[in-house]
């Protein structure tokens, strides 16, 4: 049994095995988004704003869709369907990113009417959204930048990001290629610096993604969090 599992994973290649990590990240994002109190889909908004229905059918449908997408990803990985898996990850990441936009809109909406007593909950939601932002855009960066999945030829595609190891020959890094964790670091620094740090975007799609992530971080961390802290200070 142990030999079978070793062969099973080995046959899927190093980068394809890394997809399991990406799927786990999407699962974490789903949990984080489901924990946001002020959500356009799930949250208990009626506790603070009258007339907003809590946990309606839309919430069940949305959660079911996310669960189905994660199961499809796992199935394609088990069946070793590389191209379908790559496309399914794009679709799943798009769905979770759309949910992130909905949550951002909901947070902006409730910021005006939220009571001082509920502001601490709003700050926790900001934290959950900030983590979701980093995780989702790390996947987007991994998706667009070659090599992605090694088994899918992308040799003729230009690199989207100029990592330091790509900028010149560095001893010990001659055969270096980026992995998902490199894009996680890129998304983290972009989220808090609001700009590139050690890794530069080279293509327009990379620049637009970084622009979008930075804009969402600015709205979340400075606009919403700043407004919530201001309410707390005014309430005290």
Image (cartoon, rainbow, N blue to C red):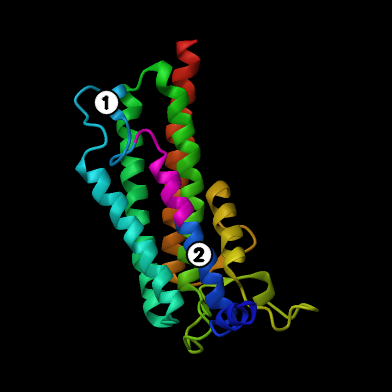
Examine the structure image and report whether residue 2 is included in the region drawn in magenta. no
Are the residues at dot 1 and dot 2 in contact (C-beta closer than 8 Å)?
Answer: no
Looking at the image, residue 115 lies above or below residue 69: above
* Lateral position of residue 166 relative to residue 222, left or right: right
**Which residue corresponds to the image point at 45% horizontal and 64% vertical from the top-left?**
140
Q: Identify the magenta region.
A: 27-38
10 Å crowding of disc 2: few (<14), some (14-19), many (20+): many
Q: Nearer the viewer, residue 120 or 109?
A: 120
| Classed neighbour count for the residue bearing mark 1: other residues with Cα under 10 Å, few (<14), some (14–19), many (≥20) | few
Position of residue 102 in the picture relative to residue 119 (left or right): left
Confirm whether residue 194 shows in the render: no
Residue drawn at 22 percent across, 22 percent down: 50
Indicate the position of residue 174 as horizontal and vertical percent values: 73, 83
Q: Residue 46 — which label?
A: 1
Q: Which residue is mark 2?
A: 22
Where residue 152 appears, as percent x and y from the top left, is 47, 85
Q: Nearer the viewer, residue 3 or 17?
A: 3
**Extreme-front residue of the structure:** 1
Q: Is residue 8 left or right of residue 29?
A: right
Seen in the picture, residue 132 relative to 186 is either above or below; the reply is above
Which image quarter: residue 107? top left
Q: CA distance from mark 1 to mark 2?
A: 34 Å
Q: Residue, x 47% and y 63% (percent of image)?
A: 23
């Amino acid at each position: 049994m142990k030999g079978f599992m070793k062969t099973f994973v080995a046959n899927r290649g190093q980068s394809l095995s890394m997809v399991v990590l990406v799927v786990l990240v999407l699962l974490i994002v789903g949990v984080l988004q489901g924990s946001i109190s002020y959500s356009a889909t799930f949250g208990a908004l009626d506790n603070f704003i009258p007339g907003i229905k809590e946990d309606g059918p839309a919430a069940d449908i949305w959660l079911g869709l996310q669960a189905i997408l994660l199961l499809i990803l796992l199935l394609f990985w088990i069946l070793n369907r590389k191209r379908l898996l790559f496309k399914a990850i794009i679709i799943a990441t798009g769905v979770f990113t759309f949910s992130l936009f909905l949550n951002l809109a909901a947070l902006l909406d409730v910021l005006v009417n939220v009571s001082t007593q509920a502001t601490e909950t709003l700050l926790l939601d900001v934290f959950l959204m900030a983590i979701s932002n980093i995780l989702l855009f790390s996947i987007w960066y991994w998706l667009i930048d070659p090599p992605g999945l090694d088994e899918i030829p992308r040799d003729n595609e230009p690199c989207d990001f100029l990592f330091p190891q790509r900028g010149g020959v560095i001893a010990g890094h001659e055969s270096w290629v980026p992995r998902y964790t490199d894009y996680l670091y890129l998304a983290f620094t972009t989220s808090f610096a609001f700009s590139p740090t050690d890794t530069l975007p080279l293509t327009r799609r990379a620049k637009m993604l970084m622009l979008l992530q930075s804009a969402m971080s600015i709205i979340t961390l400075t606009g919403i969090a700043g407004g919530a802290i201001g309410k707390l200070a005014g309430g005290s």
